Image (spheres, grey):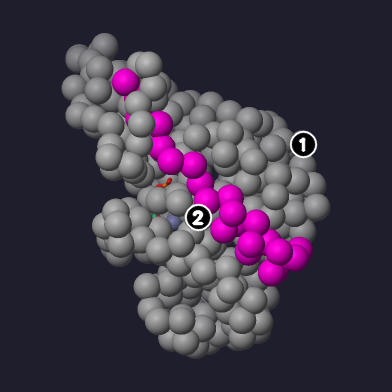
Amino acid sequence: MPLVTTKEMFAKAYNGGYAVGAFNVNNMEIVQGITEAAGELKSPVILQVSKGARAYANHTYLVKLVEAAIIENPEIPIALHLDHGDTFELCKSCIDGGFTSVMIDASSKPFDENIALTRKVVEYAHDHGVVVEAELGTLAGVEDEVSVEHGHESYTRPEEVEEFVSRTGCDSLAIAIGTSHGAYKFKASQCTRNADGVLVPPPLRFDVLHECIKRLPGFPIVLHGSSSVPQEFVKMVNQYGGNMPDAIGIPEDQLREAAKLAVCKINIDSDIRLAMTGNIRKYFAEHPDHFDPRQYLKPARQAVKDMVAHKIVHVLGSDGKA
Ligand code: G3H
Ligand code: 13P
Ligand code: ZN
């Protein structure tokens, strides 16, 4: 099937009590790892491209890689989404260039400015059959060149969501309930430690999520910053020469809980990076004489596939929903 928008995906996910994974893509191995897992598990999937990914790999290469994945996986719905678009021009370029969904992230701007820019993108996108994700509230961590320090993040204010959605006409809304970008989602001082000395983060603000759902019945909610930072990858990185002390993510059971509610899209990027980096470091340590990129990218791609398959079954619940 051709590229789809997220409209039908989200309607089914909302009613079915699951979420669709939105995975960031930057190269061929990542596209293959994600879509092979989704294809085998008959899961819908969103491939998302950031401004940084476009700068790294080039718009055309990424679109063509995604087109190849569609040919290889004809039975599953795949959407191509712009992650954290920060200007109208960037969103327009992706809409004109074949994306089926864009995010306009004006969440760092004052409320009325966020609405005005989001509305402008929505009008152009809808005229071209493309859907729009917007954001209210700011996550800590690094969002596409926008860095928000811990302590400066702000939860979404539920009393603003209805006005925001009705004035912008956006198709889905990313909210801030305590997730954050990157592999260091919480400072050690915000956490406790378990018996193994691993940080245990504070729980997500489900009260904020429930308030938003109450005000936007039937409307798809998006969670950014939702990598779980699997400790097996952190250990692998550290064991084979890396240095990522106290890397910590969002516990999977909380994401599963959110997926059963109105959360229809869950964004995952850092876990892909960790799966690849851990496995490449391990491969180099175990095969110091190898120098063919195919040799070390093969286990990295497999690790992405295994990780995505795990998410689809145990976190998103989207297996068999294609
Ligand atoms: O939220 C940001 C995504 O993880 C993309 O990151 O801008 O480094 O590609 P990036
Ligand atoms: P993570 O850094 O938690 O993977 O979040 C990715 C994301 O939100 C992309 O928009
Ligand atoms: Zn994000």
Point out which mark residue 177 bears.
Answer: 2
Q: Give the range drawn in magenta.
A: 197-218
Please say whether residue 179 is one of the residues in the magenta stretch.
no
Front-most of residues 64 and 274: 274
Quarter of the image containing the C terminus?
top right
Which of discs 2 and 1 lies nearer the camera? The answer is 2
Residue carrying label 1: 320
- What amino acid does circle 2 point to? Ile
- Residue 145 falls in which quadrant of the image? bottom left
Please provide percent x and percent y for residue 211.
Answer: 64, 62
Assess disc 1: are there few (<14), some (14-19) or many (≥20) residues with their C-alpha within 10 Å of its C-alpha. some
Determine if the C-beta at disc 1 is less than 8 A from ligand 2: no
The kind of residue tagged 1 is Gly
Q: Could you say which quadrant of the image residue 41 lies in? A: top right
Along the viewing direction, whichever of 63 and 176 lies nearer the viewer: 176
Q: In the image, 125: left or right of 109?
A: right
Q: Residue at x 77, y 42 (%)?
A: 321
Residue 141 spot, x, y in % from top left: 32, 53
Mark 1: secondary structure = loop
Residue pictured at 46% horizontal, 81% vertical: 111
What percent of the width, then of the height, locates residue 306? 53, 26
